Each structure stands twice: as C-alpha cells, then as structure tokens.
Amino acid sequence: MNHLKIADIPIRTDEAGRFSLNDLHKAAGGEARHKPHDFLRSQQTQALVSELAGEESDTGIPASVVSIKGGLNQGTYAGKELVYAYAMWISAKFHLQVIRTFDAVANGALPAPAAKAVRAAPVKSPVMVAAGMMPALVRALRCCGIDKNAAAIGANQIATAQTGVNLLALAGQQHLPTPDQEICFTPTELGHRRCISAKTFNRTLADAGLQERVGEHWVPTAKGRPHAVVLDTGKAHGNGTPIQQVKWKDSVLAEVAL
C-alpha cells in the first residue's frame, strides 16, 4: 500500500482516509512535548473538533478524529484540517512541510495514499441467523420455568417471527413429542370425577401416603412422586418465592381407596 511520506516517515491512513497523528509526530521529530494527546487536549483544538463535528452532522462526512486501540494500526487518526492544525501547533517549519506535501499530492507530483480495502462482513443466510438465535432463546425460556420441549417450540416461534424461517418446519418436525404423553389433573378435576371435593381428594391422597403437608402446601411424598408433576404457575408469593402447583396422573387413582 502506498503511504504519504513526510520526512521519509510513512503516514498511515484509516478506512475513512484520516491520517495518523502518531506518524506525523514521528515525522516532526518525536519530541515528548509534541505528543498528539497534548495537542488534542488544548482548548483551541477542542474548539476546532467541536466545529468540525457540527459539519459532520450536517454532511455525513466521517468524524474528524478517532482513536484505534490495539492491533498494528493503533493510534489516533485525524482529518486534514486537524493535521494542518497539529503541524502548526508543532512548528512553523513542520507546518510548511505538511502543507507542501499535501499540495504535491493534490497537484499530482506525489501519489495519493491508497485507501484501505474494507472487508465486507460475511452475509449469513436467514436459516443460519435463525439457528444462531435458538440457543439463547431456549436458555431464556428455560429460565422462565418452561420445560425443555416447550422452550424449543417457543424459541422456534420467536425465531420464525424475527427471520421468517421456521426451523422445525424445515426439519419436518412441526410438533415435538413431550417426555410424558400423560395428561395430568388437579385435585379438583380428579375429585369431580369421583364426586368429591378437592379438599377431600387431597385428604385421601395424604391418607394413602402420596402427599404430605409442608406449611400451607401439599407436597408429593416419595411414594407419590411417580404419579405427580410439579408445575410453576408463573406467580410468586409475597416473599418472592414461586407459586407451584401439583398435578396428578391418572395412575394415582389406583393408589387411593375411594
């Protein structure tokens, strides 16, 4: 790549065509008192940067000064106006040297610095975008208390709404099988089937050793767990703990005497 040279020092440019003040500092002799940092901190420079910023907002031209941290091209890069101001801040001699170099480029006596090629970001297909969204969406839904398969279905619905790509449909899996196909019921629903109240049915479950009272809540015992499912209601008690609900499989009816 062709660099503009001042005092045999190549002056790097960034993608927007701004010039390296660090390289200009080297070309001027590299004295500590001429560091770009001190130049940019001066009140006069700040006023110039502010004035240029107003023009940038109106015309859409690149910012007059940027800082690149890390990498081979780290340093401070500035537009031509600030380059001239920096050169004048250093010395009248260096100011003239910079002006004449830039004039030589403008008149064709010197080659202009080649602009850096901007590498285009790879374009992802909609399918890959949707696939990339899925892991984070599933984790978020799982954190909300949704079971694994329901979280996968919900994540696919969100990804479809955002990208227009239905991954489950593409895979020929419109519906995911649940780990357990049995439908579960509340004590109220099971009590209705036996023409008794939910309170009586809960008492019957307790008498059969299938659940026990813990504080104000019924909790399945070791004997009752194979027949029970504990679900998060999405609500919380006054102390912030989640409100959970116990539902029972049909198999529990064989364990109680009614």
Image (tube, helix red, strand yellow):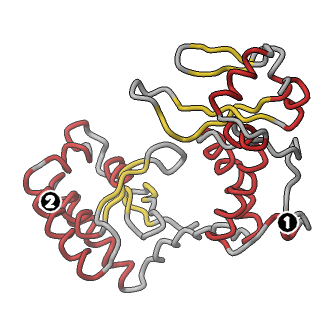
Query: Where does the N terminus fall, quadrant-wise?
Result: bottom right
Element assignment for label 1: loop
Residue for point 63% across, 21% down: 218
Q: Is residue 36 left or right of residue 15?
A: left
Q: Give me the C-alpha separation between circle 2 and circle 1.
A: 75 Å
Q: What residue type is labelled 2?
A: Ala
Nearer the observer, 229 or 82: 229
Residue for point 23% across, 81% down: 58
Q: Is residue 88 left or right of residue 30?
A: left
Give percent across and percent down for residue 41: 16, 46
Query: Where does the C terminus fall, quadrant-wise?
Result: top right
Give percent across and percent down for residue 148: 76, 43
* Residue to which mark 2 is pinned: 92
Q: Quadrant of residue 106?
A: bottom left
Residue for point 39% across, 52% down: 23
Give percent across and percent down for residue 5: 42, 63
What label sits on residue 198 in the rendered view? none
